[in-house]
């Protein structure tokens, strides 16, 4: 699994990473993952030709929430958190092109589910990348959004 770009195992039930190659999808399935969530764009230069079909053929459930890198939206985060809550007891693999979108969304999900506090979310993201202004603002606004929508 460490061969997958920017792979991070968070727990026995959750990991996030950059885009796996076609052959790495079988490894993800072999490791017991049941759900794959793709936050990248289907037509991006890193995207697989038909990831949804490849994942389904391996017996995993596939979900795609395309997040435009320069325009992340709170409704996408809300959809992601709701999806993650639905699959909370299942081994889930979250990815995007480089684990930038995935790390922020996953960190905010972990905050929403009381598995990380605000500083731990920031530290988790900082281990993977240094967010630009768009993503740092989204992360900070996301914490407020999560507190208002998911923690009240």
Image: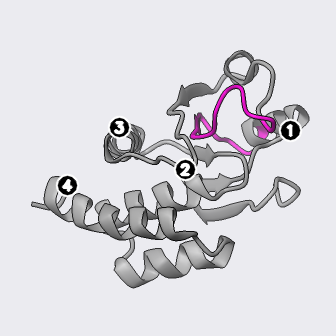
The residue depicted at 63 percent of the width and 27 percent of the height is 60
C-alpha span from label 2 to label 1 = 24 Å
Mark toward the viewer: 2 or 3: 2
Where disc 2 sits, the SS reads loop
Say if the magenta span includes residue 147. no
* Snapshot colouring: one colour
Say whether marks 2 and 3 touch (CB < 8 Å): no
**Which residue matches tag 3?**
79
Q: Which residue is mark 1?
A: 21
> Is tag 2's residue or tag 1's residue first in the polypeptide sequence?
1
Q: Residues within 10 Å of mark 1 (few under 14, many from 20)?
A: some
Residue 13: x %, y % from top left = 54, 53
Q: Report x, y in % for residue 100.
A: 62, 59
The residue indicated by pointer 2 is: 70
Q: Earlier in the sequence, mark 1 or mark 3?
A: 1
* Most frequent secondary structure within the magenta stretch: loop
Distance, label 1 to label 3, CA atoms, is 25 Å
Magenta segment, which residues? 30-46
**How many angstroms separate mark 2 from mark 3 (CA)?**
18 Å
Mark identifier at residue 31:
none
Who comes first in sequence, dot 2 or dot 3?
2
Q: Residue at x 50, y 69 (%)?
A: 133
């Amino acid at each position: 699994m460490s061969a997958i770009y920017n792979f991070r195992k968070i727990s026995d039930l959750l990991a996030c990473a950059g885009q796996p190659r076609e052959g790495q999808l079988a490894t993800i399935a072999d490791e017991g993952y049941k759900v794959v969530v793709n936050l990248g764009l289907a037509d991006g230069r890193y995207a697989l030709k038909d990831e949804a079909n490849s994942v389904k053929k391996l017996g995993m459930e596939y979900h795609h929430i395309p997040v435009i890198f320069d325009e992340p939206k709170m409704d996408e985060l809300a959809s992601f958190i709701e999806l993650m809550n639905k699959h909370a007891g299942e081994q889930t693999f979250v990815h995007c092109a480089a684990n930038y979108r995935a790390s922020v969304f996953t960190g905010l999900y972990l905050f929403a589910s009381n598995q990380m506090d605000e500083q731990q979310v920031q530290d988790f993201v900082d281990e993977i990348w240094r967010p630009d202004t768009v993503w740092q603002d989204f992360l900070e606004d996301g914490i407020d959004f999560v507190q208002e929508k998911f923690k009240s």
